[in-house]
Image (cartoon, grey):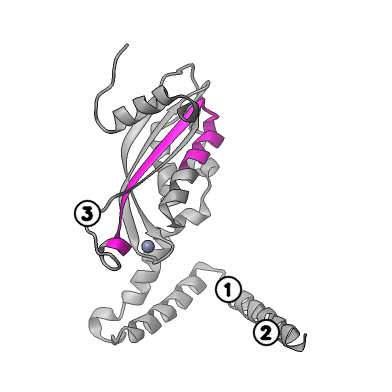
Amino acid sequence: MHRCNKKRKVEDTTTVVAAQKKPVTEDQRLETMNAACRTILECIGEDPNREGLVKTPERWAKALLFMCSGYNMNAETVTNGAVFEENHDEMVVVRNIDISSLCEHHMVPFVGRVHIGYIPNGKILGLSKLARISEMYARRLQVQERLTRQIADAIVETVEPLGVAVVVECTHFCMVMRGVQKTGAVTTTSSVRGCFESNPKTRAEFFSIIHGNGIKMC
Ligand code: ZN
C-alpha cells in the first residue's frame, strides 16, 4: 500500500515537471531541440562544437519542425473551401502523389507514393487538395497503416462521396538502413470505404487504373 502511494507521487511530480518544461513558443521549441540535438551528437561520439556541426542542431530542429508541420493543420483548413457542387458520379483517380514521412517507431523517413480514388456524390474536391491532404498526414510521426486510413477518412469527411480507396506504397528506411536491411522492400497498405468496400468490380477498376493497366471506356 505504502509503495503504491509512493510510486503515484513520483509519477505526479514527473507530470508537473514535464508540463512546466513544455516549450510553448517557436523560439522555446527551437532552443530546447537544439540542446537535445547537441546531447545526441555527444552521445554518438561527435563534437557538437566542431566547425561542420556548429549549426547542425539548429538546422535539424527546423527541419524536424517542418517534417512535423502537419500537426498544426486539419482537413478543413487544408482543403480551404475547394469543395465544389458537381454531378459527376464516375470514379476520380489521382495516382503517384509523392510523400515522405517519419516512422513513429524510429523517427526515420519512409518515402513513396499515394494513390487515391473516389466516386463523388454531388460534391468534388479540388484535385491538388488530395495531395495536400496526403502531405498533411505525412508530416506527422506515422505508421503507414494509420496514414492510409487518415487520408481515406478525411476525404469521406470532406466530400461525403459514394466511396473512397487509398493505396500507399512506401520504402521504410528503418528497414533499409538498419534491422533487416532490405533495400528493395516496398510496403503496400490500402483503405477502402463505401462502394469500394462493397463492390468488388469498383475496387478492381481502381486497382487496374493505379497499376497502369489502362482505363476501359464504356
Ligand atoms: Zn520504423
Work out whether mark 2 precedes mark 3 in sequence or the reverse, and give the earlier one. 2
Q: Looking at the rendered structure, which numbered label has been put on residue 10?
A: 2
Identify the magenta region: 151-175
Residue type marked 2: Val
Which quadrant, please, contains the N terminus?
bottom right
Q: Which mark is residue 22?
A: 1
Numbered mark located on residue 87 in the image: none
Marks 1 and 2 sit apart, C-alpha to C-alpha, by 18 Å
Which is nearer the eye, 215 or 16? 215
- Left or right side of 202 for 74: right
**Earlier along the polypeptide chain: callout 3 or callout 1?**
1
- Three-letter amino acid code at disc 3? Gly
Left or right: residue 160 compared with residue 9: left
Q: Is residue 142 above or below residue 4?
A: above
Q: Viewer-nearest of labels 1 and 2?
A: 2
Where does residue 190 sit, x and y in percent of width and height? 41, 41
Kindly identify which residue carries mark 3.
184
**Which corner quadrant of the image does residue 116 belong to?**
top left
* Contact check, label 2 and label 3, Cβ < 8 Å: no
